Image (cartoon, rainbow, N blue to C red):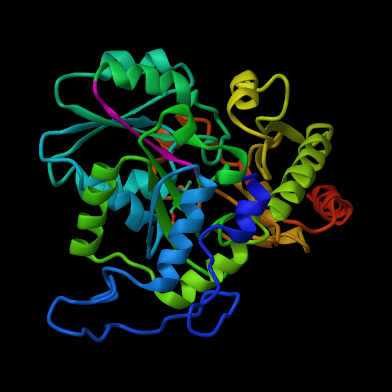
Amino acid sequence: MKFGTKAVHAGVEPDPSTGAIMTPIYQTSTYVQEEPSKHKGYAYARGANPTRNALQKSIAALENGKYALCFSSGMGATDTVIKLLNQGDEVITSNDLYGGSYRMFKRVFERLGIKFHFIDMANPDNIIPFVNKNTKLIWLETPSNPLMNIIDIEACVTLAKKHNLLVAVDNTFASPYLQNPLDLGADIVMHSVTKYLGGHSDVVMGALVTNQEKLHQELAFIQNSCGATPGPQDSFLVLRGIKTLHLRMERHCLNGKKIAEYLRNHPKVDHVYWPGFADHPNHEIAKKQMRDFGGMLSFTLKDDRLEKAFDLMKMVQVFSLAESLGGVESLINHPASMTHASIPREERIKNGLVDSLIRLSIGVEDAEDLIEDLEQALHKI
Ligand SMILES: *Cc1c(COP(=O)(O)O)cnc(C)c1O
């Protein structure tokens, strides 16, 4: 089945008791049992809920995976993956990670005895010197946030398999419409469902997808033990959001391209980070592993002062100043003071997150209005 058909249909069956075409919101914490431990697969709602199950089937299908688990946030999903590890284990991950992932790895899990190596993965061979007998996991994010670096998933998987390492890919920025890491050999795909999958800026949720039954059972055990499960109302909203994922992504990509090109030609703009440009350092890899280049981009100003970036964010009218991404409405944000504020300044600048860096999440509005908005704002600063 092709992507759009799966987005509309996967996981959703007419309700057996009424024929309702949409899966009902099963707002219940527990289920009545015929006799102790004799039930219809549902005992207590932390473990399972029919609305959540439908959503999990839908997300699994979109990622070409067999199993999916939904979580109360993206961080809840990531937390569950790291809890597969033991004290003394090591993880190799990229140095321009989502700020919240960096914070969790560094400030929660390092304290509990897990070691993280934050490295530049643009060239996968950079991973090799960091592999030792304690290494268990490679954690990738591509395209990366906010610099839109591209990591070669297949090359990392080949390397990881030689050393028996798990590969988990944070696929939030691409969405399953643009990229399917399981097809490239990854073991686990993670999503902040909050972003493109939900798509309407009204839900916080996460997901993990895998093709391996044993791994799925381990993840499900940790989830049920630790408790980061989402509620049925949120599951319903995301099921509804996913039905238009392919339509939204087409427009995000089209608008993203127009705005990336517009900004690149603007005299006040220094650099535009967008993997669709032929001179993006890993453009060929992006072309190989992604279906299109998405609606996320970042740019810097020639006048690299914090105040200039702040002025621009004040002047825009259609773009909203906010964290998050992947919704129907266009957002503007300032990584250095918002999403990446927990990364120390020297480290931030060293990795290219300069003071004037601005990130855009391009929505599904008309591109002409978005360009006009940026034009008037850039004119005033
Ligand atoms: C938002 C985000 C997360 C965290 O997800 P939440 O749903 O906010 O917990 C992780 N990775 C990336 C790339 C994100 O954008």
- Within the image, what quadrant is residue 230 found in? bottom left
Q: Position of residue 263 (x, y in %)?
A: 79, 38
Question: Is 296 on the left-hand or right-hand side of 30?
Answer: right
- For the residue pair 120 and 139, the one nearer the viewer reads as 139
> From the viewer's perspective, is 376 left or right of 63?
right
Please indicate whether residue 134 sits to the left or right of residue 309 in the image: left
Residue 62, visible in the rendered structure: yes
Residue 200, position in %: x, y? 62, 66
Residue visible at 58% across and 28% down in the picture: 289
Asked if the stretch drawn in magenta spans residue 216, the answer is: no
Which quarter of the rendering shows the N terminus?
Answer: top right
Q: Residue at x 39, y 23 (%)?
A: 157
Establish if 225 lies above or below 178. Answer: below
Residue at the (64%, 46%) spot, across then down: 3
Q: Is residue 8 left or right of residue 353?
A: right
Which span of residues is magenta-colored? 164-171
In this view, 329 is above or below 303: below
* Image x and y of residue 193, in percent: 49, 57
Locate residue 371, reporting x and y percent.
84, 49
User: In this view of the protein, which residue sits in the foreground, 45 or 93?
Assistant: 45
Q: Nearer the viewer, residue 298 or 177?
A: 177
Can residue 312 be seen from the camera position used here?
no
For residue 144, above or below residue 40 = above
Most common SS among magenta residues? strand
Q: Quadrant of residue 311?
A: bottom right
| 372, 128: nearer the viewer | 128
